[in-house]
Image: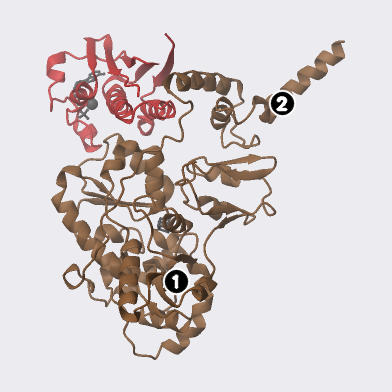
Chain colours: A brown, B red
Amino acid sequence: MDNTFINSVRLDSALCKGCINCIKRCPTQAIRVRNGKAHIVKRFCIDCGECIRVCPHHAKKADYDSIDVIEKFKYTVALPAPSFYGQFNNLDDVNIILRALKLMGFDDVYEVSAAAELVSELSRQYVAEHQDKKPFISTACPSVIKLIRVRFPNLIDHLLPINAPIDVAALQAREKAMKETGLPSEDIGIVFISPCPAKVTAVRSPLTNEKSEVDAVIAIKEVYPKILPFMKETQNQTEEISHSGKIGISWGASGGEAGGLLIDDFLAADGIENVIKVLEDLEDQKINQLEFIELNACSGGCVGGVLQVENPYVAKSKMKALRKYMPVAISHLSDTTVNNVFWEKKIEYKPVFNLGYDFMDSLEKMERATEIVQRLPGLDCGSCGAPSCKALAEDIVRGEAREKDCIHLLRDYIHRMTDDLKGL
Amino acid sequence: MSSMKLHYDVDNTDFTRAGEASSDTKKKLKLMGVSPEVVRKVAISMYEGEINMVIHANGGTIDVTISSDNIVLVLKDEGPGIANIDKAMEAGYSTANENIRSLGFGAGMGLPNMKKYSDEMNVKSEIGVGTTVTITIYNELT
Ligand SMILES: Nc1ncnc2c1ncn2[C@@H]1O[C@H](COP(=O)(O)OP(=O)(O)OP(=O)(O)O)[C@@H](O)[C@H]1O
Ligand code: SF4
Ligand SMILES: [Mg+2]
């Protein structure tokens, strides 16, 4: 089994009622209800978190580490995502948060937004030097990468092959910690405070690097209630920890990464359905002349991640207020040595949606699926456990479902049987 | 030799629906494991043809035949026809009016693109009768 098909969205069977909310909303049709419970088809799942958002019974959960993981290391560094800053009311200085993280038990803090400024500079150079490959597609959102690798093979070459800010931050933080403490790498815990399960998967099963420098990923929504009491205390302290300005912090919301490139011809789309539309149009060459395409699976960008607390649009406006008086950027390549910058591995196309094992087999299956669709009622009611009649037909030819899973066909069948019996 | 046929009626009454036929074919080809490059060629040339039908010819029909050898698209309409096919095939030639140009079409690149992305292309047209464009794209089996 390909170990790159792990994901970080889980089902709590006890809570799942087997309703159709998640199967209908999953953008890659990765969920089926079988025997009254939802099942996630791992190879189709891109970790976007839509099912977590829509499940009315809270049966879909994100998998992440508990805050207690910090006990496992001699020395820990917290890496807050840029979008974390958008969760707080009336925050006028990010140092209040960074100091509070230290009071919570972390030994040091390294802002992902600081690494983001380095990535912005690197991207500017890369895009300018590789104009023949444009438009570039952003690669900071792991859900978007996962989507492209299973559905848009023609766009793989347009992916910006630069590590995401979290990966750059993790190595920077580790090197700094080792130098300052003299401890071996294994005693240092690099802990990411994440907006989403997609980032959890990206750490546990990286697609473009051999391994991740992040040791644990904890959720913003778990850190949030714990940090608030410490912020009262750190409000009046003076220690300056922050190393990022407007550009770095802006990465937390849609348009921020593109803004950091200082170019005009870009597009920024957010929300997974919108992202899919843009990718379809890009693939068909309906979008031309753009240099950069920023894509975020969540509405509003990372502020809309499922592990956030605040409404994404409110968070976005809070971040806008927060960065108003900040310098444009504080971290620069000229003052730092950055080592892990480019992807070690290329993304490989995974044709997981293929109906058959080869073309002829797929052709035959596609024809059968088309015939089956004609027999199905076309209600897309979801009672069979598949998101649409068409999806059920595809499941049938893949050998994963039966025609009588359609309750309407089953009912007709039962009527015919009883009529036959009456006639005896 | 087994093959699969798809038929689409392209309606010109709703502009927002233009592109539905090519997008459906693209989805199906992807599910069938057709090579990404071939899918791309089909999607681009079929979309151009579909748009031409909607813009210049009041809609029409598209028949797609998919086999292990090739993918054949027959785009047929009963529109006004093309007076000078050679001219129409030239890059940049367009009779599109201001209205259509404001929608982002009318660069005169549709037919040239269809030619570029197909392996064989044939245009038959008669004034007042209609136009039939036949496109063949070779299937590359891996
Ligand atoms: N199906 C058709 N029926 C009638 N005329 C057509 C048809 N297809 C193309 N034409 C004519 O050929 C010209 C060139 O077509 P082509 O697709 O290359 O460019 P366009 O449609 O004008 O612009 P673009 O495709 O770049 O948006 C059109 O302007 C139109 O006059
Ligand atoms: S947009 Fe941001 S929060 Fe949402 S899945 Fe992508 S990386 Fe995670
Ligand atoms: Mg055209």
Can see residue A209? yes
Q: Residue at x 31, y 71 (%)?
A: A175
Residue occupied by mark 1? A87
Up/down of A349 relative to A208, above or below: above
Question: What's the amino acid at mark 2?
Answer: Leu
Please give the label number shown on residue A410.
2
Viewer-proximal residue among A134 and B91: A134
Q: Residue B25 vs residue A65: left or right?
A: left
Q: Residue at x 42, y 63 (%)?
A: A303
Give residue A178's position: percent from left, percent from top.
33, 75
Give residue A182's position: percent from left, percent from top.
34, 79
In three-dimensional space, the C-alpha distance between marks 1 and 2, rounded to whole angstroms, equals: 50 Å
State which quadrant residue A81 falls in: bottom left
Viewer-proximal residue among A306 and A341: A341
Question: Which chain's residue wears label 1?
Answer: A
State which quadrant residue A288 falls in: top left
Q: Residue A325 vs residue A102: left or right?
A: left
| Ligand 2 closer than 8 Å to label 1 CB | no
